[in-house]
Amino acid sequence: MAQPSESTQLQQAQLAAILGPDTAPFETLISHLMSSSNEQRSQAELLFNLCKQTDPDSLSLKLAHLLQFSPHPEGRAMSAILLRKQLTRDDSYLWPRLNPNTQSSLKSILLACIQREETKSIAKKLCDTVSELASGILPDNGWPELLPFMFQCVSSDTPKLQEFAFLIFAQLSQYIGDSLVPHIKELHSVFLHCLNSPTSNPDVRIAALNAVINFIQCLSSSADRDSFSELKCVMRTEILCQTFQYFSIFPDLLPAMMRTLTEALNNGNEATAQEALELLIELAGTEPRFLRRQIVDVVGSMLQIAEAESLEEGTRHLAIEFVITLAEARERAPGMMRKLPQFISRLFAILMTMLLDIEDDPAWHSAESEDEDAGETSNYSVGQECLDRLSISLGGNTIVPVASELLPAYLAAPEWQKHHAALIALAQIAEGCSKVMIKNLEQVVAMVLNSFQDPHPRVRWAAINAIGQLSTDLGPDLQVKYHQQVLPALAGAMDDFQNPRVQAHAASAVLNFSENCTPDILTPYLDGIVSKLLVLLQNGKQMVQEGALTALASVADSSQEHFQKYYDAVMPYLKTILINATDKSNRMLRAKSMECISLVGMAVGKEKFRDDAKQVMEVLMSLQGSQLETDDPTTSYMLQAWARLCKCLGQDFLPYMSVVMPPLLQSAQLKPDVTITSADSDNEIEDSDDESMETITLGDKRIGIKTSVLEEKATACNMLCCYADELKEGFFPWIDQVAPTLVPLLKFYFHEEVRKAAVSAMPELLRSAKLAIEKGQAQGRNETYIKQLSDYIVPALVEALHKEPDTEICASMLDALNECVQISGPLLDENQVRSIVDEIKQVITASSSRKRERAERAKAEDFDAEEVELIKEENEQEEEVFDQVGEILGTLIKTFKGSFLPFFDELSSYLTPMWGKDKTPEERRIAICIFDDVAEQCREAALKYYDTFLPFVLEACNDDNPDVRQAAVYGLGVCAEFGGSVFKPLVGEALSRLNVVIQHPNALQAENLMAYDNAVSSLGKICVFHRDSIDAAQVVPAWLNCLPIKGDLIEAKVVHDQLCSMVERSDRELLGPNNQYLPKIVAVFAEL
């Protein structure tokens, strides 16, 4: 028999010592688990895991012993944490492996330790361990002593025990709330007693408040879950009745919950008040309806706190956050806050007052640095952000009347701060109120332009800022109606040489204005604007030069070829900056010159730009080769400039690809810079005030993500997509590196732009490969390569679609998948088609359930017109998804024809409901188009569907919606052509349906023209394929009378080809008795 190795013997000896009667070796092991030395810690982890495998009972009891008797707090804390990990239901779940005696000992030791532990942080960790274990065994009655113990603690007169019991209640509500529902009566009275008791300790009250809020959330989700599912057992129904019954009486806790807050404030205990506010904000976000009955009192109290100048800013900001959160809780309580106009105006006034908290900082005037917010306080920033959020959540009909009362008063006041505040507020509310503000555009624009003449430069800056923001949010209406006032005002502001920051901002606002502007509006002003911007380019202040570069770039981009006349004057300046701005302090200036040069090049075109392009590329190549610092903006700007140069030069850009691609791939492959800490840890993520870090909290983890890395990655992915799109087969050499980079990013959930770019690139890569192989430029590769690439891309897209949380990206994924199928369709195997079809079912189901959810929301008591508008917008996004479903099914049917029909049969139960009268016109149109495709592509094989679908098609011919009519009348033509004897009995009804469309008095109006042309085409097909079933002497001349058709060019070609062939064979009914229709035929040909 083989002897165990020496190392194995050593390990066994170590385990025996660790788990033996002497406690010292075990304590050493635990201290090594906390060691800062990696080697020591790894060795300890190895031994710990071996103990777990070989003797879980002894290990658990050792940890419990340490918890009870260790004199070292860190040892007790560590054993609480380790026990929790072993008792968590995951891969290393130990509990089922322990013998009943160990289990019993552990349960009683944990409860004893909670009573005895003096160090609060350790006791809290113990509460976590108890909650973790209870969540696994309590539902099956595995710990009958626990709840009596907790109720006993809550009723005791020991504050720390009360607090710990509430902490456990809070966690159990989150983990296994359903198990607590039977005890709802006792819980309710315990909560009420504690929150109402004037003697309660503040920590106990906060713990009780936390428990109540968690419990309310658990009640609500349990009610939500079960009210939609069929309850199969009496017990469950009983619990549900209790839930509804008590959910309705739980709001009587609300005054007591609010008292926790008000008493803390009255006692000057703002730290407790802030904790209470944070908990109430959570409640407002998740269960706003719970507050509904007492909403007036609750919101009134919060506004009182926000108005109380004696309180800390942090407290007041949290009270405001509560009210804004309620306003934003649309999905749960649509329209509720709009029913409280008196509070909206009070909140608006509070936020306006916060905007006055701004100092006239000299750094702002000197304009030496980018520091645009010099002098702004945290009050100012919160006010600004909350105005934006409030207007987006409540909409223009609620906010504009309040603003139009307050803003003119602010503008009429003597203080510059009030003028400034009014203009900043106007810019902040524009996005949320755009529809209503567009109706009052004249007053809005006048209000802002008057302030261009204000004596204070910060007010003039705010006016320019407002014009920039309004150009974005209220464009293009503002550009079309007010360019004559706005552009000269901005040009005037560029002359303010005393205030460089105002000049720079005026140039930036030109960017906002021109982004939403057509060349015909901009061109008359170009002479004046370009000459002013050239003056600013030679200004000493870097900020002004940067603003001028950005404006020039955007003006060139918007005016396109009209910019050619300025090219010779502008380009030398731009090249000078690019070549000479080499200082570290000038990095942004150089980066912006790249942006400007590449946009000017694209605007004027390849011929004009070619000579300078060479020189610019040389500079970019040498920069690319130099070692740029990681925070240098040049990298990102250069990636974009290269891609624009490629768009401008087309295939002439290919020689530069070997320089461009390596760093671009490097940027696209950047790993997200993620930091994970515990959500309740005191050490915030380092540099939390670093603007490039964004933090999100998920469960008990706080995740910090460096956004600058994500933005560079997104830019790079977009550029890869641009190159593939622009260079087509020329991109082929890079596919092998780009595909493995981008395919995994279809599921990159840290950043939407990265996913969008990866999605758009998929069909471009396939297209590039296919074209290169067709044109013999594929380095000897053949169609097998396209098959391999398609096998890599298509399943990845399908899988990503399955997991995609964003509706808009879902639609893009379907669109990309559709293009991929168009490119490599015949190469797909049956399993791949099956996976696409299964995913389409899933997409239809998910979309329908989102619509149902919205319909539920529409039944809420406060639901109003604004919500109708918002839901309409959300449903429009669903239409885009359905649209793409229709497109991809059409492609699959065209590609696989009859062999796709078994899949179509599976899908019919998903598609048939789309014909319903209750569905949107777009859904009905898509359903008809899918049937049209089946009938057209599958011909005889599709005849079996006529009975089911033709009655719908005939009815839809006279639908109110012209797009639905067009799809239906086109379908009749297809069925007339391929339906043979199956269609014959329906010819009479088909004629009368088509006649209604053709004879309609408004048939030739623009919106009806496509339906008319398709009806004429279908009538022609009946004339050809069912001549024996019609009165040809009547119908054929009636058809001729409708010609020529000019709207739908595809159908026009079909119809006029048909006319030619009928003339060629001297069709008797067409020519008429004695050729009397010949002049009409000649007239039709003359018009073509």
Image (cartoon, rainbow, N blue to C red):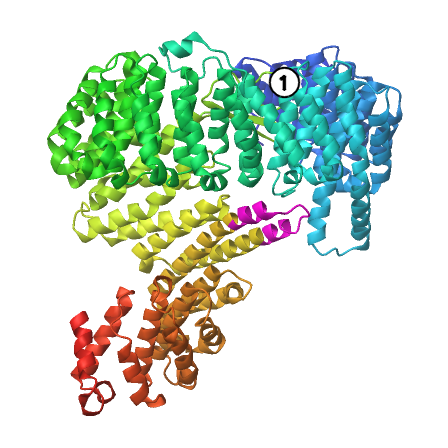
Identify the amino acid type marked 1: Gly
Q: Nearer the viewer, residue 897 or 417?
A: 417
Majority secondary structure in the magenta region? helix
Q: Disc 1 on helix, strand or loop?
A: helix
Q: Nearer the viewer, residue 941 or 219?
A: 219
* Bounds of the magenta segment: 852-872
How packed mark 1 is, by other alpha carbons closer than 10 Å (few <14, some 14-19, many 20 or more), is some
Residue 926 placement (x, y as % from top left) = 44, 62
* Relative vertical location of residue 435 with respect to residue 707 in this rendering, above or below: below
Residue 865 among those drawn in magenta: yes
Residue 864 among those drawn in magenta: yes
Residue 138 placement (x, y as % from top left) = 78, 38
* Relative vertical location of residue 970 with respect to residue 736 in this rendering, above or below: below
Image quadrant holding the C terminus, namely bottom left
Q: Nearer the viewer, residue 217 or 960?
A: 960
Task: Answer with left or right where residue 967 lies relative to residue 389.
Answer: left
Write the residue at 46% across / 20% down.
Answer: 691
Residue on which the image places disc 1:
314
Write the residue at 17% across / 38% down.
Answer: 605
Residue 825 placement (x, y as % from top left) = 33, 58
Q: Residue furthest bottom?
A: 1073
Residue 690 placement (x, y as % from top left) = 47, 18
Task: Answer with left or right where residue 212 lies relative to residue 637.
Answer: right
Write the residue at 63% across / 43% down.
Answer: 334
The tally of labels here is 1
Quadrant for residue 478, please give it: top left
Quadrant for residue 895, please give it: bottom left
Query: In the rendered image, is residue 589 in sight?
Result: yes
